[in-house]
Image: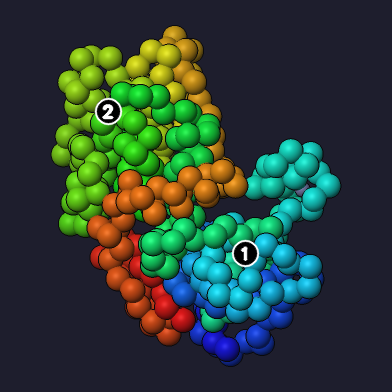
Amino acid sequence: MKALVKSRTGKGHMTFQEVEEPRAGDGDVLIRVAYGGICGTDIHIMEDRFPSHPPVIIGHEFSGEIIEVGAGVENYKVGDRVVAEPHRGGCGICRYCLTGKVEVCRNKKAIGYKVDGCFTEKLALPATSLHRIPDGLSLEHAALAEPLAVGIKALLERSVVEPCDFVVVTGCGPIGLLAAAAAKAAGARAALVTGMNGDEALRLPAARAMGIDYTVNIEQEDVVQRVAELTGGQGADIVVEASGAEPAIAQAFDLIKIDGKITGIGLSGKDTIAIPWNLAMKKAARLSCSFSTTWTSWERALAMLASEAIHVPPLISATMPLSDWEQAFERLTRLEAIKILLKP
Ligand SMILES: [Zn+2]
Ligand SMILES: [Zn+2]
């Protein structure tokens, strides 16, 4: 079968090549990939800005159908439509695995950079990492469950959205847009996303098409002033930082109300970021960092997608054959697409 492989470390070294077919071991299922979504992380792996363990098949956002069930798997059968959490399970013995936080296990085997991922025809995963796709939810839309689960963990499990909250999301990549839409679905009175000049063509219009109330181009407009106007001078109840940009991270403290919450979901290109500490203290800011996803965030993501509480079509710019991966990656790098699904 064909696969998109990061063949060695360094910039580039991506090859679309023949690889051996995986087998379903004990406790595993073999999945035929229907759609694989390209994530910013995949582009960072290509550019060598995110560590990977080559040679490895990349890709971690996908939907598919079970075509083989390994020994000992009782709750899934051939033909079941599934998505999967992006790891082959944690070590199973550390305090995080044992308390249901496998996503932060230091020894988890993340697919798409540590072990083989989804930009191929078939992959074998433990049945314990799966979630069933609800009836009526298409395989295309289900492929967005992972980035939506990232937003849901941040907004419903780390900083909890309360009814009528005013939510600001800084950054309008797919995760930012999905987080803002999830905030609305969870009862926020309004959501505002920020972007830059490069986002005017696609991402900010997509935000509006998804039902996000306000969009602000921070290169054209003062977002702190706009949020103050929209909140009677109070500030946002929650800021979700999904840009990773140092100025946006620092500005989150200006955007929140007193006793407001900030949740980070984006890694930054910089390891150390200057933040206004005294302002944070005086505002009694509640700061949290949200990493990856939880079992519950996946179930909620699938339920929100199935009920169309999240309107995803504006987010999906194209579905392309996996063999056209290079063109798809280029379109994303040039901000000429928001989310592209690859079909093996
Ligand atoms: Zn991703
Ligand atoms: Zn562990």
Horizontally, residue 212 falls left or right of residue 6, namely: left
Q: Amino acid at mark 2?
A: Arg
Rendered residue at 24%/41% (across/down): 212
Horizontally, residue 332 falls left or right of residue 87, namely: left
**Residue 141's spot in the image, x, y percent?**
38, 62
Residue at the right extreme of this rendering:
93
Of residues 51 and 288, the one nearer the viewer is 288
Rendered residue at 26%/35% (across/down): 192
Residue under pointer 2: 189
Give me the disc on residue 111.
Answer: 1
Instruction: Characterize the local packing of mark 2: few (<14), some (14-19) or many (20 or more) Cα atoms within 10 angstroms.
Output: some
What colour scheme governs how the chains and residues are painted in the rendered image of this protein?
A: rainbow
Q: Is residue 265 above or below residue 134?
A: above
Of residues 93 and 30, the one nearer the viewer is 30
Ligand 1 within 8 Å of disc 2? The answer is: no
Q: Nearer the viewer, mark 2 or mark 1?
A: 2
Ranked by sequence position, the earlier of labels 2 and 1 is 1
Horizontally, residue 24 falls left or right of residue 143, namely: right
Q: Secondary structure at mark 2?
A: loop
Q: Amino acid at mark 1?
A: Ile
Q: Is residue 260 above or below residue 76?
A: above
Rendered residue at 46%/58% (across/down): 134
